[in-house]
Each structure stands twice: as C-alpha cells, then as structure tokens.
Image (cartoon, rainbow, N blue to C red):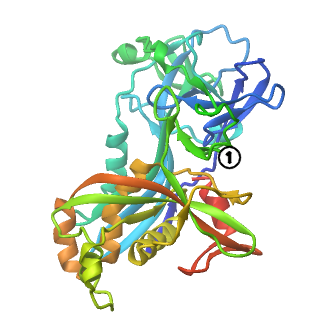
Amino acid sequence: MISDTYNFQGSWQIEHQCPQCGAPVVLDETDHLLACSYCRTKLYLVPQGRFRYRLPPPEGMAKEILYVPYWRYRGLSFSIQGGDVTYRVIDMNLLAAGIKSLPSSLGLRPQVLKLKFIAPATEGRFAKVRKTLQNLTEGLLQSKPSDSLQFMIGDAASLIYAPFYRENRTLFDAILRHPVMPWDETYAADLLEKDHPADWQVRFVSTLCPECGWDLQGGKDALVLLCRNCRTAWNCPGSSLEKVDFSVMKGGVGPVVYLPFWRMKSRIEGVRLQSCADLIRLANMPRVVTPSQEGAPLYFWAPAFKVNPALFLRWTRQMTAYQPADELRETFGEASVHPVTLSLAEAVDSIPLAIANLMMDKRKMMQLLPDLRITLEDSLLVYQPFHVRRSELIHEKMGLVIGRQALAFGAEL
C-alpha cells in the first residue's frame, strides 16, 4: 500500500458572533458546534446545503466587492489497481468560477486570515459557481490509470468567496490591492450577476435533549451528540435533532475510552455476501464454516471518526473479519467518549473498499467491484472500549491499537 498527502493545509478559522449575546466567537473549519464562552450558549450549526464562507475585504474599502467562489475540499482518496490499494489525504482549494484568468487557488490567505459566514446582509456581488465539485475531483483522479477504481471517503466540501473589485477596466484582488486581470466584458455576466440567495445563511439549532431537556454533550466537531441523562444520541441532518440508535460494548477493567464505529447490514447485488459464511469463503479465511455462520447476518464495520487512511483501511478489514458480537449495553458510565466525526453515509461508501481489502482473488475483485450495488438495510452506532495505555489506546479482544497522536491527526481531516 502506498500513501501520500495532497497539499495538507490544516484547519482554517471562522469569525462569528454569538446569536444569543453578540460576543465574538472563533470557530475551526471542522466545527459543528458553536460554544460561546460569555453566555455559555451551545448551538449546532446547520448550513443550507454546504457551508459558504467569505474572505472579508479590508475595512473601509469603498469599492463594490465582487466575490469569486472557490471550492474547499478535504478527504481521503483510495485507488485500487491490480489488487493494490493506494491512498492519500486530499486538501485543496480550487477556482469554482468559469474564468481561467483568475487565480486558480486562494493560496495561503485563508490560513492567515479568518473567514466569515455569508449572511443576507453581506454587501457585494457573488459570482456564479460554474465548476462543480465533481468536475474538480474527477480532474484530480485523471492522473490515475483508467483500469483503477477510485473511492473518496470522509470528504468535506465548502465554498469560499474571495473579494475582488473593478477599477479603470482592471480587476483587482481586494485583499492585496494588486491587479489580477484586465476587465473583459465577456466575463461581466459571471462577475456582475448577483447570486446571493437568502438560504445561504447558517441556522442554529438548540443542543438541549428533545426528550428530557438535558444539555447534550459532544466535541465541537461532533456529528452525534449524547445525552448522559436519558441515555440517548442525536444528530441534526436537517432543521431539527433526530435520534440515533446506538449501543455500547461492554468494557473491561481499568481506564477506558469509547471509540465509535458504524455497524452496517447491507444488501449487496453482484456478489453473494449476506452471511458470515459468505465472508469466510470470499476472504478465504482459515476457518471451518459452521451451520450457525451460514445463518448469521454479515455486518460491515467502519470507524465513525476520521483517522489516517492506513488505519481506516486496517480497521474496516479487521473489524469486518472479526464480526464483534460482545454483550451490548446502553451506558458509558463515567468513561470518556470520542466524538463521531464520520457520517453513516460516508461509512456506507467505504463498504466496496472493505470488500476489496478482504477478497483474496484480486483478479476477480477488479471484475466484481464496478458492478456492485449496495443498499443499506440496517445500521447501529456502536461504541467500542479501548483501554488507555500511556500514549496508546488498545482494544484488547481484537488487538486494535491507535496512538493518541493519530486521533489528533484525524481531527484535522
């Protein structure tokens, strides 16, 4: 397996005001929760579609600002060719407008300047998005051989609008105040068309438990919030909180941290893979198939948190092969819980990758994977106990090990 990193840029920051008291709040790009240190308000951030930010122009600028869109994309890219899996971390920003003479990326500016959410009161003109995210990601993958299979997992995409202005038939970068290109009337339709729907505004959802009114808990980048009072879990896929089914694997003795995993039961068309016995045969495991395994449903497993690609591949394979079936319960006690940062939809996207990683017949694998049809039938968020050992966390039954630094790196993806 081979890995590389495509222009890793770290997390960017966003300036905002607390909707409750108006105090300044600084968010990381990966945050889903706004927590105000002044009034103690905690709210869940809900964009309409994708998050849209802007780089603010210098204060006091009297020019009409023309905002140009750029895609910001982060995620894990996996490629399968000839039975080998390669992967890389992709972190990029690329021009989304259809004007080739504009800068192709934002450069370092978002790393040294703080972004702002676009609000209905934001003045200026917002150029149309002409390049879809699919166009850009396909362009990145064109360098791969045509007979390879591509998978994108854990991806996060947003739009960032950079400020420009027009003066003396020249388009200027509003931040650097440098000329960018001569003004051309053929671009006027794109740059002067005011594209600024009201539904770009980010909405804020209360983080009180809908069932008992208790404060929900979760890290600032958490997709799932927990109520320790009534033992429920919640996410916010739309305009309100929705309950998430979860269970907790029974832990052992000593300090424990619970890490979340998605357990998925799927209907797969294109290969026989419905029972544990089917998996044993497909992966050519050194086990004797028993009658109970013929009837035991097959579950695919994937981390419910972002982690480096090597660990993601290893854990999806090991946990799916192991098929954890320990005693489940509904409480963590007082143990620490790692936040859910990878959605169920992204975990489902990883199932073909898990199949490829498990199949022993690599030639057959390359023939089967393009035609697989996967339908999710059932899912459960399962928290697995990892024992704390200095700088590592260890799952004693399965032998899974992760360093705390690897968890910290995943938080930046």
How many neighbours does mark 1 have within 10 angstroms: few (below 14), some (14-19), or many (20 or more)? Answer: some
Q: Residue 216: x, y in percent?
A: 66, 39
Residue beneath the point at 66% across and 75% down = 252
- Whether 199 is drawn above or below 398: the answer is above
Residue beneath the point at 29% across and 79% down = 292
Residue at the right extreme? 38
Can the viewer see residue 186? yes
Q: Residue 129: x, y in percent?
A: 39, 26
Q: Quadrant of residue 56?
A: top right
Left or right: 174 with respect to 89? right
Q: Quadrant of residue 281?
A: bottom left
Left or right: 74 with respect to 386? left
- Whether 171 is drawn above or below 318: the answer is above
Q: Nearer the viewer, residue 18 or 71?
A: 18
Q: Residue 325: x, y in percent?
A: 45, 72
Q: Which residue is mark 1?
A: 228
- Whether 302 is drawn above or below 52: the answer is below
Which amino acid, by three-letter code, is at mark 1?
Arg
| SS for callout 1 | loop
Residue beneath the point at 34% across and 28% down = 130
Can the viewer see residue 307? no
Left or right: 339 with respect to 326? right
Left or right: 315 with respect to 15? left
- Whether 359 is drawn above or below 110: the answer is below
Q: Nearer the viewer, residue 88 or 17?
A: 17
Residue beneath the point at 84% across and 27% down = 38
Quadrant of the frame with the N terminus: bottom left
Q: Residue 342: x, y in percent?
A: 50, 51
**Number of numbered discs present?**
1
